[in-house]
Amino acid sequence: MTAVFGVDIGGSGIKGAPVDLARGALTEERYKVLTPQPSAPEAVVAAVREVVRHFDHQGPVGLTFPGVVVGGRTRTAANVDKGWIDLDAAGLFREALDLPTTVLNDADAAGLAEVTHGAGRDQAGVVMVLTFGTGIGSALLVDGVLVPNTELGHLELRGKDAERRASSAAKDRHELTWEQWAGRVDEYLDHVEMLFSPQLIVIGGGVSRKHDKFLPLLKDREARVVPAELRNDAGIVGAAMAAARAAG
Ligand code: BGC
């Protein structure tokens, strides 16, 4: 089939690359631009166009977004410009790129990639992929099938939005030690485990690079807790997978 392109739109960077779907890997080195600040839709669309045009790509494009996405419409924007709320994002990107586009939640994209090509590939049953970054993203997969937009970063923890207490940005903001932060992550995982009883929890997001600093500090639990394997590429690969599925 034609090549599929993935774009990961994050709070600090927008990165993209063509993806080999059989291997779940990038076929060329990814190209990255800084996310415009403020991250208003027109500015982000222009940045995405720059990333895609960097490659000679003709074919479907999948894009991640750090908020709820239903039928190509972005519905929430916890950590990005509020102009994204209730916007036909897929339509905007399609017009700007003149290519077929698919938009999905960033953690959902990482989840698809991890259960197909990464840390969750041999796990049947309920898998939860949680990304710790500016916010906390969540993907819930049952035998590889995604239940999109679970938004578990916004569970309530001690009367607060969980991502305000336990994201990796919260670690930095409150200058927590790894031990202190691991305590908060444990409390968060207790809550997630109580609600969904996953067999496997995959920890992703930028901080998963440093998993040896905090995974050993987490308490034992029913679910196996493992680091993500695709790291930085999970969003790009998952976005391309979603675009390929949409293209049939
Ligand atoms: C958003 C989610 C997103 C997560 C990680 C949260 O604040 O509500 O949609 O997946 O951040 O970016």
Image (tube, rainbow, N blue to C red):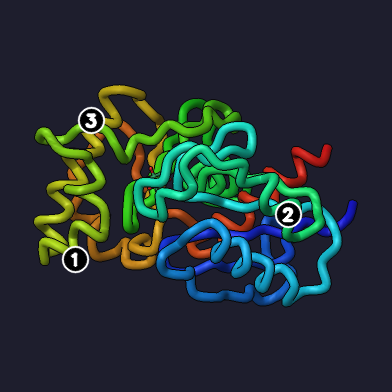
On the image, numbered disc 2 is attached to which residue?
61
Q: Residues within 10 Å of mark 3 (few under 14, many from 20)?
A: some
Mark 2 near mark 1, Cβ–Cβ under 8 Å?
no
Looking at the image, which residue is at 38% across and 40% down?
A: 201
- Distance of mark 1 from mark 3, alpha carbons? 22 Å
- Residue that carries the numbered disc 3 in the rendered image: 191
Disc 1: which residue:
172
Does residue 115 show up? no
Question: At x 57% / y 32%, what residue is drawn?
Answer: 70
Q: Give the amino acid at mark 3.
A: His
Residue 224: x and y in percent read 35, 39
Which mark is first along the chain, 3 or 1? 1
Would residue 110 be seen by someone viewing this image from the given angle?
yes
Location of residue 206 in the rendering, given as x and y in whole percent from the top left corner:
39, 63
Q: Is residue 17 above or below residue 203?
A: below
Mark nearest the camera among 1 and 3 is 1
The CA distance from mark 2 to mark 1 is 34 Å
- Which secondary structure lies at badge 1? helix
> Residue 146 falls in which quadrant of the image?
top right
Counting residues from the N terminus, which is met first, the one under dot 3 or under dot 2? 2
